[in-house]
Image (cartoon, rainbow, N blue to C red):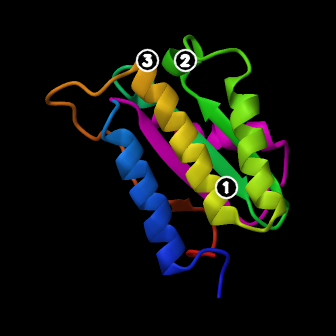
Amino acid sequence: MGAFSEKDQERIQFAIEEAEKSTSGEIRICIEKHCPNNVLDRAVKYFHKLGMGQTTLRNGVLIYLATNDHKFAIIGDAGINKVVPENFWDSTKEAMRHHFKANNLTEGIVTGVQLAGEQLKKYFPYNTGDKNELPNNIAFIGRDKH
């Protein structure tokens, strides 16, 4: 069995759907086994590859995780980075890291999604007629579904 069972994947996707009900923002999860270079560079690469910079309000958030290398990053687009507190991504990473250290990847990701969703809701509330601009499924890079 991989790092994420079907139940884990459903839980993560549900957390994204719940977070996005209150915001026009978009949250994506990108997972691969290995991060061959700098984790932020890798996250930026997939941020663009997944079309996250194309949202109308530039309010996409990507949580990137390299499971075997124990690396992760959270990056937000220009719109969200302009408004969240300066230490927001660091405090979110610390909350996630707590779960990761306990070997609970799913709970860590769900925590990150919930915290990102709270900030998105505050600064980019849901607007009537808002459409989901990006898919809510996990983007697995390389092998399928780890």
**Which secondary structure, mark 2?**
helix
Q: Identify the residue at image location x=79%, y=44%.
A: 39
Q: Say whether residue 18 is left or right of residue 67.
A: left
Residue behind mark 2: 78
Q: Nearer the viewer, mark 2 or mark 3?
A: 3
Q: Identify the residue at image location x=50%, y=69%.
A: 9
Is there CB contact under 8 Å for labels 2 and 3?
A: no
Tell me the distance, in whole angstroms, between the alpha carbons under discs 3 and 1: 23 Å
Q: Say whether residue 33 is left or right of residue 44.
A: right
Could you say which disc has been placed on residue 144 in the image? none
Image: magenta residue range: 24-52
Dividing the picture into quarters, in which one does residue 137 lie?
Answer: bottom left
Is there CB contact under 8 Å for labels 1 and 2?
A: no
Residue behind mark 3: 123
- Image position, residue 64 (x, y; %): 66, 49
User: Which mark is first along the chain, 2 or 1?
Assistant: 2
Assign the C terminus to one quadrant of the image.
bottom right
- Image position, residue 139 (x, y; %): 52, 58
* Any part of residue 104 in sight: yes
Is there CB contact under 8 Å for labels 3 and 1?
A: no
Residue 49 versus residue 4 in the image, above or below: above
User: Which mark is first along the chain, 1 or 3?
Assistant: 1
Residue behind mark 1: 108
Q: Identify the residue at image location x=40%, y=31%.
A: 25
Q: Say whether residue 101 is left or right of residue 95.
A: right
Query: Is residue 40 rendered magenta in the image?
Result: yes
Tell me the distance, in whole angstroms, between the alpha carbons under discs 2 and 3: 13 Å
> Please, what is the three-letter code of the amino acid marked with disc 3?
Tyr
User: Which mark is first along the chain, 3 or 2?
Assistant: 2
